[in-house]
Amino acid sequence: MGEKRKIELDYSQLDSERMRLNVGPQHPSTHGVLRLEVELDGEIVTDVIPHVGYLHRCFEKHCEKMEYPMVTPYIDRLDYISSMNNEWPFIMGVEQMMGIKVPEKVEYLRVIVSELNRIANHQIAIATFGLDAGAFTPLLWLFRDREMILAILEKLSGGRLLYNYFRVGGMAADIYPTFKEDVLAAISQVRKTNPEILNLLLLNKIFIDRTASVGILPADVAINYGCTGPMLRGSGVPYDLRRTEPYSIYDRFDFEVQIGKGEVGTVGDCWDRNIVRYREIEQSCNIIEQAINQMPMEGDVKEAFPKKVRPPKGEIYCKAENPKGELGFYIVSDGKNNPERVKCRSTSFVNLSVLPEISKGYMFADLIMILGSIDIVLGEVDR
Amino acid sequence: MEQNFVNMLIENPWIAALIIVVIPLVFVVIYALIAILGELKIASFVQERLGPMRTGWKGTMQPVAEVVKLLQKEDITPDAADKPLFNLAPFLMFAAAFAGFAVIPFSPYFLPAGIELGLFYVFAIGSLGVIGLVMGGWASNNKYSLLGAMRSVAQIVSYEIPAAIAILSIATLSGSLNLNVISDNQSGWFWNWYIFGGPGPWWKILVIPFTLGLGLIYLISTLAETNRTPFDIPEGESEIVAGYHTEYSGMKFAMFFFAEYANMFIVAAILMLLFFGGWNSPFGDFLNQWWMQPVWFILKAFFWVFLTIWLRWTLPRLRVDQLMYMSWKVLLPWGFVCFFAVSLFVMLK
Amino acid sequence: MGLLNRLNEPFEGGGIVLGTVEDILNWGRAKSDWYLQFGLACCAIEFMAVNAPHFDFMRFGTIPRTSPRQADFIIISGTVTLKMAERIKRLYEQMSEPKYVISMGSCSNCGGPYWEHGYHVLKGVDRIIPVDVYVPGCPPRPEALEEGMILLQKKIRHEAIFNKRKRIAEEDKKLGLNIK
Amino acid sequence: MQAQEIFDKLKEKFNDDILELKADAPSDPIILINGAELFNIAQFMRDKEELDFDYLVDLISLDLGDNLGAIYIFYSMKHKHRIALKAIVPKDNPILPTLENLWRTADWLEREAWDLMGIKFEGHHNLIRILNPYDWEGHPLRKDYVTPEFYHGMKVPY
């Protein structure tokens, strides 16, 4: 366009050309530093090539160099929106290898903080998804509601976002005196403000038009691509590790695994994935309510701390239900203070790999919506 | 009636003409500052925040600071851009928006150019702005800009048709294309406004649903023409970064910014003149003095501006094909229905 | 810098008038800061929280812009990896003068927890672009970022716009440097 | 189905290529296999009705000193059982067959294993680096990896 050139009319040159568009790493709706190479035919997406690794922070290298307790802060920084959930599978794996049985109070406390963090995570997921659709206000409303949960977690652990709260054999700090009241107040607040978001965003006619029957992910494709969490449940597969392979004390609680039913469109579309997240917030409230009422308030959370964290020789795969799906750590120990190898089965990484499959043939605006509905966190994709 | 108070006060026609040109310009600048502040503050109110608080009293000087800042920003022209077009685009867009003010009657005593074809002129000149927009998008040599420009062409061209039908209906109803005459026809109480069928016999009640529909059609179309949510597809931030003005910085970006707000006022003014009685007081002769009429006019227009800001912070954005669907399959057929109903009414009246 | 280049010549050696003009220009730049809507890592979430109702970044007159051309400052919110570093440099170059940088969090200050074994982490964003304000913390609390913003505004308020080169040369002369 | 039963099923079909079952708690049960036959074993595991492993959970690459290892974890959504396969390849010639035609998720997982550990997957349609830049040298998770001094003019060590 810049240089002056003679324009010759040749009709054979008038065929339409496909445009290669580079989305990211700096783009308002790539949720961080993802880069997508998009091939467009007009507005229709014909091909998507995700380029990841812009936030590759060498997590697995650090694990090999660090002692076991020193690994937890790095795990926090994987999926930085749901740190509590991240720490759990790793700590659980080390505990299983060392044969540590944690006290009852710790189990309940872990369930409560994880579910609180799950609520915070889903709030961000819905918020940023709304932002992708052009709705700015729900984002700020959800961030407002999230602060109450962050306040509780901050009082417990001292951190607002990255907690480093789980320890092998217990927790870093005991609960504070008004913990129960705070948690109950936070739940009732979430229950009160949640329908606002439903009415403002999720049931909005424009929003439904944008998301219904967009980015349909059939169940068999989802399983073949290894998608888990709300991605898979949105496609109608009730796979939730808290229910299918209950870890910790999840078998004691009464909650429903939410699946997408295709209420406004087809099963497995963007709207389904988000309504699953929305309903999981309600289910998490139920779990927290049961847990906080059953939880023994007396007792020491540091009771079962081992003198030295040095698991015996062995390999273990330990997984837990992260808000985004199945998060697993494969820990190889050779009996030293450092792990020999830690491999993180990162949810977002696997979930993101399905993007090219489900976004072809939709419009460019839909691609952004589909990407938003996957709910990726680049820290976990790139590790 | 067709008098300008400036002409009455000043004898020299050249100086008078100059003053007549300067008044809307000053008004646009002041209005844009207020609208920017309103945008920030209303957004903050909707989002339970405070908004700008540290610039002047409660942040009221914020738009002034923005302008001072934008004046000093580096003026970047990308190397690969088509430089003449790139530099011309924002000025063309602002000129188009500003030219519309020539026929807007702020009051019966202030009409910059009292031409008979005022409605036709403002509609024609309003379409010129899209050329500036496309020019900017194309000349930037940026794919996002190009996408934004292409989208906006499709959008604005499509939505001009329902808007034109709404305008045509009112022209039929009022029998004039002179904005001042149209406004004058609606004098009296608010049931004489064209949104309520205009002045007429009691059985004009039958036509009220259709004129209300026309008002709605015009409102939606103008939302699309001014690129406001839910039709802000040409600059949809989450998709195409900043749309056609991605590559613009400093003063040229400010021109786009001003043009956008000036356009908003133009369409608001047309809406008020056609449907909501223009500069007339809603309550008959109450507060309908010559000095209150511009105040009524500006207040009514500001209400529409407020409405668009409110909508912006509430609704998500539509998709391109849904936007086209809305225009061609919803607004256009209903526009025709309303137009025929109104024409029938005029014939029977 | 557009207007400023033209102002530079006739105001050479001005007195009080010049001071006031400079004050007004600095006031505008300090009070109207548009930032690039750009997040890197963990800090980006806290950065979003700063925009949220509890902390309300807009109180300082900041507005998010998605295009670097229209942004006044960029917040490097998170770990800068080697793969990303070149892009950040490009973004910084695309921004229009006057432009500022806030480095948010330990990672972009110095590499943070990845300083030792991070084979793919740039140890401090100041190795590629100049930084105006460093905000420590991992991640910094929203209040810390707001303080960083206030510091940046203070810095902008006291900037010398006119005769910048002359003043720098005088300072250099005092220090005994001879830089052309 | 328990690990022992799965092992027996595989042993029955593939005989010598299934080496041993390691199932000493607390470690997870792992079946050691011959890497060259990985594709056939995996296909059998996916398609056989009683096994029906439709979900490849993860691919873990290991540096075992002289050898490299790859661990595949499978899960069956239908039967709700889980098993891990382990294949060992020599470090100087680390080649395994690709599984991306059986489970699409293997596409990215194998690219990651190639990027970080340097295991080559034969038949992969696009085996390029995924996390590190495309022009990165070496495979960082190997024990003998040395961090480069400079990358594109930027100093890497602190």
Image (spheres, grey):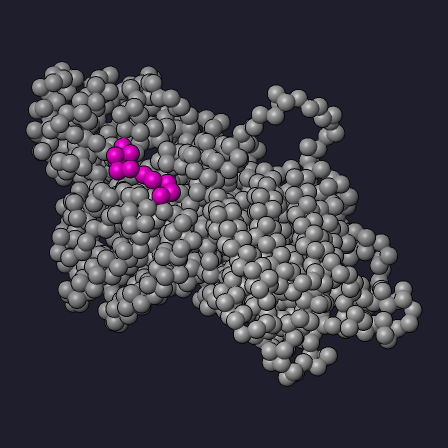
Can residue A103 be seen? no
Q: Quadrant of residue B192?
A: bottom right
Depth check: give the residue in front, B185 or B61.
B185
Q: Seen in the image, is B9 located left or right of residue C152?
A: right
Depth check: give the residue in front, B170 or C137.
B170
Looking at this rendering, what residue extends furthest in the front direction? B348
Q: Residue at x 69, y 47 (%)?
A: B132
Q: Which residues are magenta?
A: A213-224
Q: Residue at x 72, y 72 (%)?
A: B107
Q: Seen in the image, is D4 located left or right of residue B349?
A: left
Instruction: Give the percent coordinates (x, y) of residue C59.
Output: 55, 66
Q: Residue at x 31, y 31 (%)?
A: D105
Q: Residue at x 47, y 65 (%)?
A: B47
> B178 above or below A102?
below
Instruction: Give the percent coordinates (x, y) of residue C129.
Output: 60, 45
Can residue A252 be seen? yes
Quadrant location, the N terminus of chain B: bottom right
Instruction: Give the percent coordinates (x, y) of residue D8.
Output: 8, 24
Looking at this rendering, what residue extends furthest in the bottom direction? B286
How many circles with numbers are drawn on the protein? 0
Looking at this rendering, what residue extends furthest in the right direction? B12
> B203 above or below D118?
below
